[in-house]
Amino acid sequence: MSKRIFYIVLLFLPIFSVAQKVITGTVKDNKTKQPLQGASVVVKGGTGGTSTNSAGEFSLSVSDQAKTITISYVGYESKDIAISSVTSGLEISLVPTEQLTDIVVVGSRNLSRTRTETPVAVDIIPITQIANQVGQTDLNQILTYVAPSFQSSRQTIADGTDHVDPAQLRGLGTDQILVLINGKRRHQSALVNVNGTVNRGQVGTDLSAIPVTAIERVEVLRDGAAAQYGSDAIAGVINIVLKKNTGVLGGSVSYGQNITAYPKDYALYKITNRGEAPDQKVNDGGAFQAGLNYGIGFKNQGYMNFSGEYNLRDFSNRTGTYTGQIYPSVGGQNKDDSIMSARGTNRNTFDMRIGNSKIAGGSLMVNSQFPLGGGWNLNVFGGYNKKNGEAAGFYRYPSSVFSGAGSTYRSEALELYPEGFLPLIQTNIQDYSISAAFEGKVGQWNASFSETFGVNTFGFTVDNSVNYSQFAVQTPTNAQTKFNAGELKFQQITSNIDFSRNFNVLHGMNLAFGSELRVDQYGQKAGEESSYRNYDIPSGAAAGAQVFAGFTPPFAGTFSRNNIALYADVEQDFTREWMVEGALRFENYSDFGSTLNYKLASRYKIADKFTIRAAASSGFRAPSMQQRFYAKTNTLFVSGPSGLVATESGTFPNGSAPAKILGIPELKQETSRNYSAGITAKPFTGLEITVDGYIINIDNRIVLTNNFTGGSDPALQALLSAAGAQTANFFTNAIDTRNKGIEAVVNYSFNIAREHKFRFTAAATFIQNEVRKGADGKPIIKASQILINSGQLGNYFNREDQSRIEVANPQSKASFMLNYKFRKLGVMLRTAYFGKVTYLDPSINPANPGAFPMNAFNNNQRETLDQEFAPKTVTDLSVSYEIGKFFIITAGANNLFDEYQDLHKHANNMSLGRFMYSRRVQQMGFNGRFVFARVSFNIK
């Protein structure tokens, strides 16, 4: 053993015995002369590196052989400085640039690693530049159009999901993306998506709670990173970097609205054989946004940067004209036309509201740093966001009021709502967060001690509604029509200790280690009694507030868990060209046990222009607290052969008595294996190309089952009845999946005659997701023997569930953006391509076409309800002009040519004419053209 140690020491002795010298200096902005904190200082050739402190100062130990250092900072041109003669007191100025290519925070704990040097794919999206050029006003929509791997579509008729847009990376789930702010974990939304939209059964992070005005850039790590950051980082990591500039008052005011046309009477014309319905012009969805940002610099080089933003968005509506029966039959006959004529109404009176929800909200964000002396800083950031939303449910026509109220209370219900009613779901969403970190040096180690706290509350109010059974204790003249339906709450506390250090081993080694303690807490608050109570069970009247019955006391409560993690990672540059990274992370959860994950990655430079890279890792995602404890009865409209059918469905906890009766397995963590490989190239100045391929295998994916009935089991039937539900569903680990894809990004910038500046960006992603299948070609479903024996696998996981994973989102997506600048004039032209999507109906058996439902749009021929929606291309255009030194005026249009996704082809998919465009599968939404104008300013 002693001989072995001797040889190891002998091997590394030359490395540590090289003569050293210390380089010191200050890095500043060339124009403002402000110090640049966090600028990268590396020895050219890869022999070590450091970063500047809050005063822009740095100190770097290098070998005597080092001749040049490279200084770089995000948004600035890099600079090489010769150090052969001068080694101390260097004064270095960096020039701002529009090309963002340099230091990244996410994906590497090496403070000097640039994004093209990382062994995995990292995108840097300059939100500060993009936000003033486009009509999208929230982060979800901005990223959807500039980052092809990112996809988010606004949902409709989906309860709370109308107010928080689900987002995906690489076609995976909303809860398989980890979101960071300034490198610190961001808490998730309290809401879990339980309706029949994309990302059903999943929990995401509300990116719209972060004001765009506060964001400098977004870093998107497109690779598994659970070994570095912990749970959820299966698809990748999104790191939001906040602004820290000082001395400049910046902001913007914008307004836009949809100016579009669509064939509202499409179904009505189809079933009456009147040919093609004419387009009806619509102006709606007005969106106002005002944002302000200002930073204060302190004499000791500290700063406080403040951002505020207000958003007001009106609802949009792309409903089709209802073709069904509106009023109760008279003498067994439909008398709708004569009744509407007598009452002065028409079918437009009974329109649903299918489109964007109405939102009014405001945000505040602060990002600050306070130097404490001795090289230590206190970094604090946090924010508050409040949104009030309003969305509609299904219209309750007089005919459905007649049946819903039962024979006992139908006269009272029709006296209260003679024309029926459109119930509204109103939300009060609040988000609080604060993070504080002491950062400095412990000896030669970079150290950080941080605490991050975040809360999201999601309150529900139901308006313009009624609890039919409540007529047992009230009359139509004093009937309650507005209900407090309760509240969801999610809270997270994260404590981190992190150390990192760069060693002059070979061509540079960065070692990092640390620990994390996290406490998650989820709570449900019951609604007021009238929002859920059945006041007269024998009457048969529907109980609870129509559209969204309140949360009930038996499922109210607060639930907590904690986990602790230890990690270590190392990046070793063996040569100037070859770097290897390794990471290990151990986590222990109080509710399901431990997990150990790894990551191994490498990058090799071929000359200075080409790089190849590859990575392999394992990952995991712990079941969210919402998936474990969410419980409620919802009115779901479930697909059937003849259309949508209203069903009172109870979502019960995974460990509940109904789940045990059905043999639903207990929840456990999802696990993943990620593999990726790619190339980067810089063939010549201004051109940058990256191409990456990946495979992600995920075991034990958590899904929300479909609805089980009580069947012949009296115990289960009694439990459902006690909860006011006809059916039950649960969260469970049901399937394994494989995700494959290729991503490519090309950036090219150049100038013509100095004043004509061009920047091209092209990006594309190609995704293939699949549920793992057996030798028979059918999905392998992890179900209990009870479910298999009772023939209920279709209720556990059906073909629509399969389609949500495989084909309900675009499998290919691409964008091309051209930016042109000439003196004070700027032009942005962008096209975004959304690949095909497919809807698979759960009631269809492709092997039995004789049982397909008849299509009233095609002479009642029997046709499948499945539909493939063709690819679509959306074009955006904006023009900007600088006025004086401080102001810029921008005008433009998103979806300039008013493109819509395909109309439904089968009458039974339209719910009697109302859903012209699918809400089950979506590409770019269905709002049509959006025209906007913006005034932005930067006053020094």
Image (cartoon, rainbow, N blue to C red):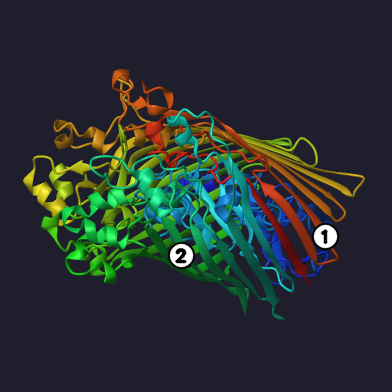
Labels 1, 2: front one: 1
- Residue 658 in the image: x percent, y percent? 16, 49
How many residues crowd mark 2 within 10 Å: few (<14), some (14–19), many (20+)? many
How many residues crowd mark 1 within 10 Å: few (<14), some (14–19), many (20+)? some
User: Mark 2 belongs to which amino acid?
Assistant: Asn
Q: Is residue 27 above or below residue 84?
A: below
Residue at 54% x, 59% y is: 314
Q: On the image, numbered disc 1 is attached to which residue? A: 882
Classify residue 313 by image quadrant: bottom right
Image quadrant occupied by the C terminus: bottom right
**Camera-side residue: 845 or 854?**
854
- The CA span between labels 1 and 2 is 45 Å
Say what secondary structure mark 2 lies in. Answer: strand
Classify residue 701 by image quadrant: top left
Q: On the image, numbered disc 2 is attached to which residue? A: 496
Tell me if 266 is positioned left or right of 722 in this view. Answer: right
Say what secondary structure mark 1 lies in. Answer: strand
The label on residue 50 is: none
**Camera-side residue: 329 or 218?**
329
- Residue 525 in the image: x percent, y percent? 29, 67
**Do we see residue 753 in this rendering?**
yes
User: Mark 1 belongs to which amino acid?
Assistant: Glu
Tell me if 730 is positioned left or right of 500 in this view. Answer: left
Tell me if 868 is positioned left or right of 288 in this view. Answer: left
- Residue 252 in the image: x percent, y percent? 69, 65
Q: Is residue 450 above or below residue 727?
A: below
Q: Is residue 234 above or below residue 374?
A: above
As drawn, which residue projects farthest toward the right? 753
